[in-house]
Amino acid sequence: DIVMTQSPDSLAVSLGERATINCRSSQSLLYTSNNKNYLAWYQKKPGQPPKLLIYWASTRDSGVPDRFSGSGSGTDFTLTISTLQAEDVAVYYCQQYFSIPPTFGGGTKVEIK
Amino acid sequence: QVQVVDSGGGVVHPGRSLRLSCATSGLNISKFAMHWVRQAPGKGLEWVAVVSLNGTRTEYADSVKGRFTIFRDNSKNTLHLQMDSLRFEDTALYYCAVASPTRHWGQGTLVTVSS
């Protein structure tokens, strides 16, 4: 199974500042035949199901604010929230869908400083 | 509009069984692999099981292999999870998830295994 490791476990950021979350996979998520990274990011708030933010490592899902961006390739990926808003307080998860089982990272809790 | 509704959760004794269901509307699930994902209290997201488009292939997390069975009825746009020999550690909120990555999720159904 592919192991997904997120860092940090939690971070506190001032409103309007940048938040950066890292995700590392135990093997490459880049499928060379289509040059796509099989990596997604989700936002999880209490009492709600996860919300898909990013797929193919850097493609924002429909309706996701452009302050959310994803980057990286191979085994190292980053989710960036460029200017943190109060409604962004949540736990963020990366997930690989390169192979079964589609494993999740341990999550990163984002709070307001 | 796509709707995904999970049901079937409840409180059950260890060793007993429970069947979860997921009803969908607004999409043809026969076009998607379907998953169950769970979140134990205070823990992260854990993938549980997947069933292929036509239901012939299934995969399970090691933690549930041999005890849980995922199956689907494309004619009714429904997904199910038969959970047998339940353990305390199966206590979690269970989500139905359409495809991976997942844009459409159920709201979750709570399973509590308690004596």
Image (cartoon, helix red, strand yellow):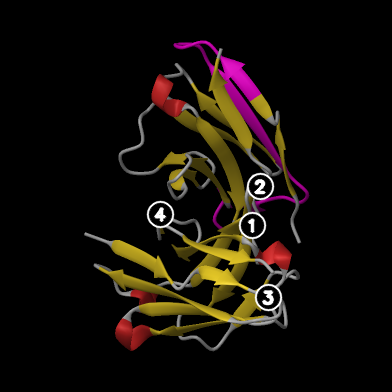
Residue projecting furthest to the left: B1
Pointer 2 with pointer 1, Cβ within 8 A: yes
Q: Amino acid at mark 3?
A: Leu
Task: Answer yes or no: are tags 3 and 1 on the same subunit.
Answer: yes
Q: In 3D space, how far apart are the residues under numbered discs 1 and 4 (Cα atoms)?
A: 17 Å
* Residue under the image location 58 percent in, 84 percent down: B57
Pointer 3 with pointer 1, Cβ within 8 A: no
Question: In this rendering, which labeled residue sits more in front, label 3 or label 1?
Answer: 3
**Is residue A20 in the magenta section?**
yes
**What is the chain identity of the residue bearing mark 2?**
B
The tag earlier along the polypeptide, 2 or 4, is: 2
Question: In this rendering, which labeled residue sits more in front, label 3 or label 4?
Answer: 3
The tag earlier along the polypeptide, 3 or 4, is: 3
Q: Nearer the viewer, residue A11 or B101?
A: A11
Which numbered circle lies on residue B86?
Answer: 3
Task: Residue B27: give x, y in percent of width and height.
Answer: 28, 69
Q: Amino acid at mark 2?
A: Lys
Residue under numbered circle 4: B103
Task: Residue A12: give x, y in percent of width and height.
Answer: 60, 17
Secondary structure beneath dot 1 equals strand
Q: In 3D space, how far apart are the residues under numbered discs 3 and 1 (Cα atoms)?
A: 16 Å
Which numbered circle lies on residue B46?
Answer: 1
* Residue under the image location 40 percent in, 60 percent down: B106
Q: In 3D space, how far apart are the residues under numbered discs 2 and 3 (Cα atoms)?
A: 19 Å
* Residue under the image location 64 percent in, 57 percent down: B46
